[in-house]
Image (tube, coloured by chain):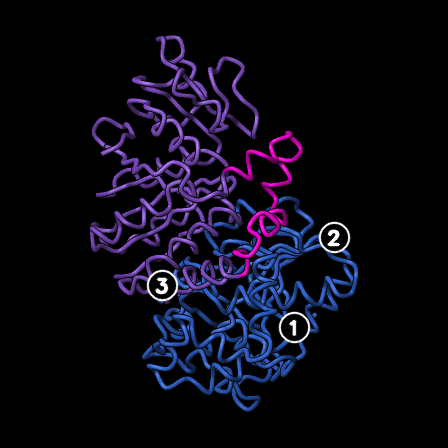
Chain colours: A purple, B blue
Amino acid sequence: MKIDVCFSPILYPYYVENTDTIVVVVDIFRATTTMCMALNNGAASIMPVATVEEAKAYKEKGYLVGGERNVVKFEFGDFGNTPSEYTREKVEGKDVVISTTNGTHAIDMAEDCSCLIIGSFSNISTVADFCLSQKKDVLVLCAGWKDKFNLEDSLFGGALAEILVDKGAYNANFDAAGVALSMWKEAKPDILAYIKRGEHMKRLEAHGLLDVADFCLQSDTTPVLPIYNKNTKKISLQ
Amino acid sequence: MKIDVCFSPILYPYYVENTDTIVVVVDIFRATTTMCMALNNGAASIMPVATVEEAKAYKEKGYLVGGERNVVKFEFGDFGNTPSEYTREKVEGKDVVISTTNGTHAIDMAEDCSCLIIGSFSNISTVADFCLSQKKDVLVLCAGWKDKFNLEDSLFGGALAEILVDKGAYNANFDAAGVALSMWKEAKPDILAYIKRGEHMKRLEAHGLLDVADFCLQSDTTPVLPIYNKNTKKISLQ
């Protein structure tokens, strides 16, 4: 099987080669890390919505709503986009609506695929185990930053590729996957230092979110497998 | 000033930040290397056209026509997409029409910018000198492969970034440019070996074009500065 990495939601149509591919949507800072946390803390589902207007409409219907635009929380929101806000006390048993600058957009782009799962460093081993059990091609879809390439999501692509290749079942010998793998090998000794070169880290630092970034780069803190259901448009655990 | 790298023609609109930016279109294997060769050998201009039909129509009007689709030369063409075909004997004083899988598409995407130049390893120092003299932001626009990320064009982005940063005038501290720079530093000791990991090299090898690839990775073999004129839609030397 092959694993490839798509560096921007806009490029997704050019990377889909067969309908059977598992698409792993990743937005390390912070949407997919946050979704894993909420589901690990017992949320019934995450409902990703594309626009602020939709998020607001759900809030008015009584839903819990979280998310951000350009790193800043909605003034009407129950949560921002920081994993630790989504505590068990607040989310257990609830459907949580989330809309973010990049992550929900990436889900939108790939929502017609046959298997869309949510990836982050916080559930990377669970994602890898699922891919290995399914024996299907894998495409990591990076949310990026406003459709541009970013470091942290690509790096996750390299990290997942390393696990799958090391298990002997996957080939990451493709231009984008190969570069993501090189990035990961360079970053591994000190991931936070590597990511600090990135543009998003500067945005997070400017908003006092450096500790959140550090958390988002830790592996396997929330070992869940969030799967998107294209009929209900909800993300939940299997 | 800043230098950034856009990994796909499709992403170009997301990377344009100001109208003053110099856009360097690059398609190492082989369109932009070929264009530099033809102009260095005295061609009056290169006329990039998007479709095979347009190329054929120009051929019927008596123009010299070159190019390829999926690495294979047009059956009606005077040239393929290999630099050494464009000899002085054949091209001197002539307008040459070229249409290729990726390179002419990238020019199309950026044709409304204020300054579009053609880059390749074969004219990299000339491109760098021009950027330094203009004192403007630079965006390397990679032609890629069918809108996907590829190794060789991104690598050129890193190589150009290194020159501009080393001169002290440019900042390449952006996610994509930073990764391109890392790729270049990794590749530099043996560029051909690095590029051999790439998908396009396999395509070229399959068509017996390994020596052409080697030529396309050599620096400053054709020290020209091809500039695109959006009014005439021709590329020529200043």
Magenta segment range?
A186-215
B13 left or right of A173? right
Closer to viewer: mark 3 or mark 1: 3
Measured Cα–Cα span from mark 3 to mark 1: 30 Å
Residue B68 image point, x, y percent: 38, 73
Residue topped by disc 3: A172
Residue topped by disc 1: B124
Measured Cα–Cα span from mark 2 to mark 3: 36 Å
Whether residue A230 is situated above or below residue A1 in the rendered picture: above
- Report if residue B108 lies within the magenta region: no
Whether residue B161 is situated above or below residue B18 in the rendered picture: below
Q: Secondary structure at mark 3?
A: loop
Amino acid at pointer 1: Ile
Residue B202 image point, x, y percent: 37, 76
Q: Quadrant of residue B220?
A: bottom right
Residue topped by disc 2: B1
> Main structural element of the magenta stretch: helix, strand or loop?
helix
Q: Secondary structure at mark 1?
A: helix
Amino acid at pointer 2: Met
Mark 3 residue crowding within 10 angstroms, few (<14) / some (14–19) / many (20+): many
Mark 1 residue crowding within 10 angstroms, few (<14) / some (14–19) / many (20+): many
Measured Cα–Cα span from mark 1 to mark 2: 18 Å
Check contact, mark 1 vs mark 2: CB within 8 A. Answer: no
